Image (cartoon, helix red, strand yellow):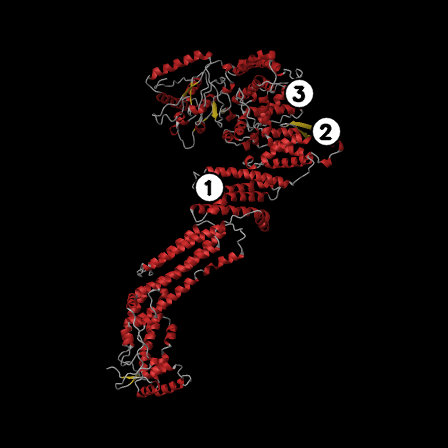
């Protein structure tokens, strides 16, 4: 084979088949570790197969051919290059076949228009060759799919004698190589399309030096059905019935629930598999049914299907292939049908077996069907024509021959004696029957018939060997060997689910003691058995002898039902029924009756199984602890919750028929088991560590789920009773509440420190024109909101008390901040200058006399306070006000956020705790009042700063123009309009900084301070202020100017508000308007206890008279009140 190899036009299909087989042995590069993608990788390992001495010449010819090929190409050419050439030759072959006239029609795969769009390297050679031989249309989509289906499995060349084959896996992990070549495939057999099955680990096989093929262990045969094959013939002739492929594949995928009863017998020398034993067991069962008259051959229905049906067949599950069965018929026929379904026997195999056994009985008068040599009779009565697939027929024939060899030769129950010489003869006949299939069609039937005739003579003589007094012809010892016999019985008993229904029916028919007649009682009493115990014999009654082992078996299942029924309780209900029925029967046999009700036994099953499942789960979680980032107890809580959920949804539906509160039993037990693991952790938890934050929520969620499960069964009242009597609550909420309070107290201390630091570092400048508050209040809210976020981020259980503590701490933090904001604000007395000495008007110079009760000691402001007052400029005062307003306006949002998150937290949790009472619910609704202290404090601070701002402007900033110079000496010469421009500047500055919501409050404070200053000037202006009734008109005009200034045409304060404030000045101006005699008379009446007709007091009347530029008034106050006189300043 050279690199420039070309295919001739006359290349025949047979030659292409041979060449395709050669290329197929070295196909797609991905079969050999990806050699073509990376040529630097080493070639795949070659495993040498020992051959027989009779093949020595063939060995030499093969080596010569190989050396010739290497010499022709290049002696220096390595294996990789050779495989690359094989690939190119494969490409040439496929291109020739697809472009020539060998293929009737080529169907392109989806997305391809011509052959140029198809990757030839991904086309199955097997499929193309079969289509060419059969003259069928070639679907390249199917060819590509079949090629990829077989990529993951090693390809073994089984044509002729070979010396090497390539493995996908490393040979050191694959076990020894097969040492026996498969039987040759007849020339008429189509090339198979390999459908891989699940890999079954082969038994270890010792490889010796080449020996005779007949002496090799048959467990080393390539024909062992570990790989399923389906030919292309099935595409055209596809039956709806299930075939052996589906049966074997399904049986490997689903193991019986009785595997725990497996006896672990040695492997058979012929390599028969579980599938072989299962099918043979059913054949024996059919023969037994036939001996009892229950053998009926069902009508076989064949349906032709299109090619795409094959694709659906390859993906069909076991449930589709074995559970589509008709309703069970009564009696032996129905039982046999149930066993067929449980043993996963296809309908086609069932029909062949039944018909073959019926044909075997023809001419055998007086012989029972179960005394036949079943494999031999089936070989003789079932022909190749009854199989649609040659491979299936060869596999079936191989199984029958292996069964004969195991039963008659390898595991005989009776010694051979003189018949020992026939053993080799029997093996030779087996080999000839297998080899007959490789002969020419005309010679196949002749040799097979002759071999079967000889086989019948030898096998019959071996199977009818007498033992234990048996008469020849009455017994058939072909499967009596212990290993084979037990293995066959194990397969029959493995399908226990169908038999359980029958067992239950029979157990229900057993009458109670009081229902049995006298004769029946005596008869059952006489039937006893004795079992050899350790040192003595133990007697059993009839029922005890065969029901006690069954009871042990069902107890074993139910004491760990989580393990035995982990995939579903399909059999559990029947097993529980069997357990309860046997318990009733054996209880009567022991003359103890029912010592305890059935629910107590169910209690024991639940306790045993739940404990076992929990222990296994705990070990599994602890084993994964090193690789998991979660605490072991948190993971264990999640797994326990899953276990309980499975127990309640899967198993409780079965157990509740016998124990209505089975879910409560399992839930309370899991609560106790997990609690024992959790208790040490709770005792050592002192702070909110990562482990605590991880474990507490998981444990609490588990407890709440357990409570909900029990409440769904017994209700709230029943749950209360259970909690008091059986459960010891974890107290997670109480423990976590203590830890949360510790954390809250620590955080609140830090918050207070941070708040003080933020206020001390504040410069009281607005953040921006849009955000005219200080940065400190934003920082305070950031700190508080972060603390709230951390609080709610804890998933540990919390009570309302912890939330209340947190909110009280926040409330205190806002009050501390408010106090720091108002700290520099001085008292009213520190701003308003001392009131001058009250004097009376006199034109002459007079001595100054002092009336003690009217003289106030002059108080001066210290330098520190004076410095603080000076620093409190109008913009900074406005920023303080804005910051306080921002604080109080955001309180509602903070409050709503806290209440919303708390409500969501409570709604998400399953609150079945008894502590969730109406009291705690009312506590949740009262959370909106948590910040009332802060609101009250902030509002009072705003009012105080607004008052301070007005007083500072009038009595500090405008003291000279307003307090000292207004109406000085003469009203007309020092009117109020002289200072309105300054007051307007101050008001504009205030409105530029203050927020809109506080503007009116600050301006109102300024108006009040202005009116206070005006009254101060009129009533306590000192000796420089004198007024006459004629000045009242000017004063009224000034008061109106002041009023309209603050109303500002509707843009300022509301008119009603201004009018109300101004109203307290008008009575004083009205007094100034009055004549002196009227004022003196009114003052005289007031001092005598009467009421003033002007609605004022004596002090106001006295001050008006003291500032009256009238000698009568001066004389009166001098005489009556001893007011000193003073001359007006010049």
Q: Residues within 10 Å of mark 3 (few under 14, many from 20)?
A: some
Looking at the picture, how far across and down is residue 996, in whole percent? 35, 64
The structure residue drawn at horizontal position 51% and vertical position 25%, both measured from the top left corner, is: 234
- Rendering quarter of residue 150: top left
Q: Is residue 663 above or below residue 544?
A: below
Earlier residue among tags 1 and 2: 2
Q: Quadrant of the C terminus?
A: bottom left
Q: Which residue is mark 2?
A: 526
Closer to the camera, 263 or 750?
Answer: 750
Task: For mark 2, give the secondary structure.
Answer: helix
Q: Residues within 10 Å of mark 2 (few under 14, many from 20)?
A: few
Q: CA distance from mark 2 to mark 3?
A: 33 Å
Residue 229 in sight here: no
Task: For mark 1, give the secondary structure.
Answer: helix
Q: What is the count of numbered marks? A: 3
Nearer mark to the viewer, of 3 and 1: 1
Q: Which residue is mark 3?
A: 368
Residue 1031 in sight here: yes
Earlier residue among tags 3 and 1: 3
Task: For mark 3, give the secondary structure.
Answer: loop
Closer to the camera, 905 or 28?
Answer: 905
Q: Which residue is mark 1?
A: 632
Q: Which mark is residue 336?
A: none
Looking at the picture, how far across and down is residue 556, in whole percent? 59, 34
Nearer mark to the viewer, of 2 and 3: 2
The reply, left or right, for residue 455 in relation to residue 1042 is: right
The structure residue drawn at horizontal position 38% and vertical position 57%, both measured from the top left corner, is: 752
Looking at the picture, how far across and down is residue 679, in whole percent? 50, 45
- Rendering quarter of residue 244: top right
Q: CA distance from mark 3 to mark 1?
A: 66 Å
Earlier residue among tags 2 and 3: 3
Looking at the picture, how far across and down is residue 236, in whole percent? 51, 26
């Amino acid at each position: 084979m050279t690199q420039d190899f070309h295919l001739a036009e006359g290349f025949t299909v047979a030659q292409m088949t041979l060449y395709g087989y050669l290329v197929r042995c070295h196909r797609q590069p991905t079969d050999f570790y990806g050699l073509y993608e990376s040529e630097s990788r080493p070639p795949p390992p070659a495993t040498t197969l020992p051959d027989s001495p009779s093949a020595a010449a063939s060995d030499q010819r093969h080596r010569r051919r190989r050396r010739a090929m290497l010499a022709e190409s290049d002696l220096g050419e390595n294996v990789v290059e050779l495989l690359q050439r094989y690939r190119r030759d494969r490409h040439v072959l496929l291109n020739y076949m697809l472009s020539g006239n060998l293929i009737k029609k080529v169907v392109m795969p989806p997305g391809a228009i011509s052959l140029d769009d198809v990757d030839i390297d991904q086309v199955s050679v097997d499929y193309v060759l079969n289509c060419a031989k059969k003259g069928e249309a070639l679907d390249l989509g199917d060819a590509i799919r079949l090629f990829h289906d077989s990529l993951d499995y090693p390809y073994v060349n089984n044509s002729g004698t070979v010396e090497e084959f390539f493995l996908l896996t490393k040979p050191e992990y694959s076990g020894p190589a097969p040492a026996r070549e498969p039987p040759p495939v007849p020339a008429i057999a189509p090339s198979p399309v390999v459908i891989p099955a699940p890999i079954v680990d082969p038994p270890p096989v010792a490889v010796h030096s080449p020996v005779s093929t007949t002496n090799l262990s048959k467990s080393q045969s390539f024909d062992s059905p570990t790989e399923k094959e389906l030919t292309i013939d099935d595409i055209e002739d596809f039956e709806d019935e299930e075939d052996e492929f589906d049966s074997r594949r399904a049986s490997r995928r689903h193991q019986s629930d009785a595997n725990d009863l497996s006896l672990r017998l040695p492997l058979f020398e012929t390599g028969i598999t579980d599938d072989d034993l299962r099918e043979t067991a059913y054949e024996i069962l059919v023969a037994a049914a036939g001996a009892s008259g229950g053998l009926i051959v069902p009508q076989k229905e064949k349906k032709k299907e299109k090619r795409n049906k094959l694709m659906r067949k390859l993906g069909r599950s076991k449930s589709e292939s074995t559970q589509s069965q008709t309703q069970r018929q009564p009696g032996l026929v129905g039982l046999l049908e149930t066993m067929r379904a449980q043993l996963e026997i296809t309908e086609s195999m069932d029909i062949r077996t039944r018909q073959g056994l019926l044909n075997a009985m023809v001419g055998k008068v007086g012989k029972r069907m179960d005394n036949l040599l079943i494999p031999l009779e089936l070989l003789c009565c079932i022909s190749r024509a009854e199989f649609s697939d040659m491979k299936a027929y060869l596999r079936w024939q191989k199984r029958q021959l292996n069964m004969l060899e195991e039963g008659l030769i390898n595991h005989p129950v009776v010694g051979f004696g003189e018949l020992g010489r026939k053993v080799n003869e029997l093996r030779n006949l087996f080999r000839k029957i297998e080899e007959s299939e490789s002969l020419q069609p005309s010679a196949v039937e002749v040799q097979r018939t002759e071999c079967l005739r000889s086989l019948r003579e030898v096998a019959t003589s071996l199977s009818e060997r007498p033992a234990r007094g048996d008469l020849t012809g009455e017994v058939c010892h072909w499967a009596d060997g212990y290993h084979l016999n037990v293995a066959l019985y194990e397969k029959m008993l493995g399908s226990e689910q169908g038999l359980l229904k029958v067992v239950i029916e029979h157990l229900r028919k057993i009458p109670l003691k009081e229902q049995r007649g006298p004769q029946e009682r005596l008869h059952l009493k006489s039937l006893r058995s004795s079992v050899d115990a350790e040192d003595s014999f133990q007697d059993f009654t009839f029922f005890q002898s065969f029901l006690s082992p069954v009871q042990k078996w069902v107890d074993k299942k139910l004491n760990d039902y989580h393990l035995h029924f982990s995939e579903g309780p399909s059999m559990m209900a029947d097993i529980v029924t069997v357990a309860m029925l046997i318990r009733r029967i054996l209880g009567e046999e022991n003359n103890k009756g029912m010592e305890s009700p059935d629910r107590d036994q169910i209690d024991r099953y639940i306790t045993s199984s739940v404990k076992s499942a929990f222990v296994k789960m705990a070990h599994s979680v602890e084993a994964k602890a090193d690789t998991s980032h979660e605490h072991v107890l948190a993971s264990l809580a999640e797994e326990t919750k899953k276990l309980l959920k499975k127990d309640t949804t899967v198993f409780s539906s079965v157990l509740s028929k016998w124990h209505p509160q089975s879910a409560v039993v399992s839930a309370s037990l899991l609560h106790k088991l997990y609690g024992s693991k959790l208790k040490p952790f709770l005792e050592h938890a002192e702070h909110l560590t990562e482990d605590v934050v991880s474990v507490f929520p998981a444990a609490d969620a588990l407890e709440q789920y357990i409570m909900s499960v029990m409440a769904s069964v017994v209700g709230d009242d029943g749950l209360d009773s259970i909690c008091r009597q059986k459960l010891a609550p974890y107290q997670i909420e109480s423990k976590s509440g203590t830890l949360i309070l510790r954390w809250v107290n620590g955080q609140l201390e830090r918050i207070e420190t941070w708040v003080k630091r933020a206020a001390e570092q504040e410069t009281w400048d607005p953040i921006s024109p849009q955000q005219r508050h200080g940065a400190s209040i934003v920082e305070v809210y950031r700190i508080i909101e972060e603390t709230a976020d951390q609080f709610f981020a804890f998933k540990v259980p919390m009570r309302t008390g912890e939330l209340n503590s947190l909110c009280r701490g926040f409330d205190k933090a806002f009050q501390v901040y408010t106090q720091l904001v108002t700290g520099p604000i001085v008292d009213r007395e520190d701003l308003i200058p001392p009131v001058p000495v009250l004097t009376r008007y006199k034109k002459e110079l007079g001595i100054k006399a002092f009336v003690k009760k009217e003289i106030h000691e002059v108080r001066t402001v210290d330098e520190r306070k004076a410095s603080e007052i000076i620093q409190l400029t109008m913009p900074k005062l406005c920023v303080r006000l804005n910051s306080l307003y921002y604080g109080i306006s955001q309180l509602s949002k903070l409050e709503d956020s806290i209440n919303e998150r708390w409500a969501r937290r409570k709604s998400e949790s399953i609150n079945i705790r008894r502590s969730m009472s109406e009291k705690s619910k009312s506590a949740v609704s009262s959370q909106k009042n948590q910040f009332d202290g802060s609101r009250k404090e902030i509002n009072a601070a705003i009012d105080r700063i607004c008052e301070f701002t007005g007083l500072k402007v009038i009595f500090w900033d405008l003291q000279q123009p307003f307090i000292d110079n207004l109406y000085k000496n003469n009203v007309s010469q020092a009117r109020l309009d002289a200072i309105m421009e300054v007051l307007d500047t101050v008001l504009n500055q205030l409105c530029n900084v203050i927020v809109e919501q506080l503007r009116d409050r600050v301006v109102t404070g300024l108006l009040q301070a202005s009116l206070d200053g005006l009254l101060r000037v009129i009533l306590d202006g000192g000796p420089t202020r004198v007024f006459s009734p004629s000045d009242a008109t000017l004063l009224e005009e000034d008061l109106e100017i002041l009023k309209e200034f603050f109303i500002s045409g509707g843009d300022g304060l509301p008119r009603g508000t201004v009018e109300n404030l101004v109203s307290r000045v008008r009575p004083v101006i009205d007094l100034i308007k009055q004549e002196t005699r009227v004022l003196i008379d009114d003052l005289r009446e007031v001092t005598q206890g009467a009421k003033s007709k002007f609605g004022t007091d004596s002090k106001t009347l006295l001050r008006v008279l003291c500032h009256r530029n009238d000698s009568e008034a001066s004389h009166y106050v001098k005489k009556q009140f001893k007011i000193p006189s003073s001359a007006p300043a010049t």
